[in-house]
Amino acid sequence: MATGISISSTSNLSSGQKILVAGAKEAFEPSAPNPDLIANERIPQGHKQWDVLTFARLTNAQALTEGVDLASSEQLVANSLSITPAEHGIIGTISRRLIRRQGDSNIVRTLGTLLANSLRRRMDLDVIALYDGLSKSVVGAGNALDITSYRGAVAYLLTDNSSSYGPAPMPLVSALHIEQISDIMLDISDPGTAAGNRPAGFGDDLLQRWWKGRDRLYGVQIFHAGNISRDSGDDAKGAIFNQSFAHLVMANNADVTTENDNSLRAEEHGIFQEWGEGERADVHGIEVYSDAATTLT
């Protein structure tokens, strides 16, 4: 269902005009990498559902004896996942008077950016919700993420824990709340524990570049997921995974629309897109549930 925003009332118009005198500025968005971190699929035109089968491994290969018939056979087993995209969208309204007072199309471009950001945020949150459904979890509420837990999660994912899906393939990625990233950095850089916790070759120069996302920890790229929220206990739920753990299925590129509302003397600008998401391989991801309380008061 589409939602709407409006700057068409007299009071909002006045505020908008004051802002535009100094130049139109839109709010900054949190980083939203999650849709790009899982497998992306597209439904061909004319189809309404996306299906994938994952075939379990065959495990009954055996030594044979000459002249003895191989009487046993192994059944092919498949796990299925079906995803039906749903429509998402948002509409924004701008009064023609505001556009005239602006004198150019800056306000329309600003609204377009805000609409696109809102749609991306919704998609990002939908993917983040999948992390809470993972069966395996590390750390626990009230406890800080440390290098030992992080290393253990990576080791678990690379272990053969499922005959249906096998170990998670590389590369792995992690999507974490910024305070979870801060905790693991603190654990690595703490002078009291650094000698035992810091991986070989992980020097101060790498710590200084960490926030720019240039480096990996145990081969796993860490992403700051800005839309992961804290719960009532100041804990957050991120994840470490391979993209095969889940799929994001899109039915179309974003549709951008413009309509005139003559009675309101305004323009309606909208953006709409169909997508759906679902978990395919639970053993290819681990939830990271840990303390995310801010260190500032």
Image: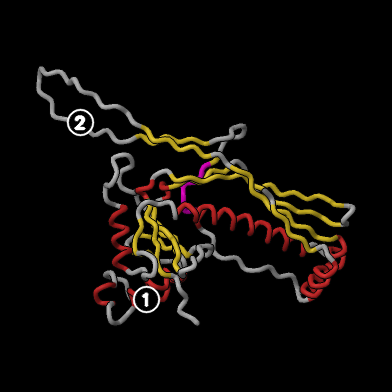
Considering depth in this image, is 2 or 119 the residue closer to the camera? 2
Q: Is residue 80 above or below residue 75?
A: below
What kind of element bears circle 2?
loop
Please name the residue that numbered disc 1 is placed on: 186
Tag count: 2
User: Looking at the picture, how far across and down is residue 102, in whole percent?
Assistant: 83, 67
The one of 197 and 292 positioned closer to us in this rendering? 292
Image coordinates for residue 267, horizontal then vertical, percent: 82, 55
The magenta segment is 36-41
1 or 2: tag closer to the N-terminus: 2
Looking at the picture, how far across and down is residue 234, in whole percent?
46, 70
* Label 1: element kind: helix
Kind of residue indicated by mark 2: Ala
The relative height of residue 209 versus residue 171 in the rendered view (above or below) is: below
Name the residue nearer the viewer: 200 or 74: 74
Most extreme residue toward the front is 232
Residue 73 in the figure: left or right of residue 97: left
Q: Is residue 9 left or right of residue 205?
A: right
In the rendered structure, find residue 61 and report the number of the disc placed on it: 2
Q: Residue 233 location in percent, x, y? A: 46, 69
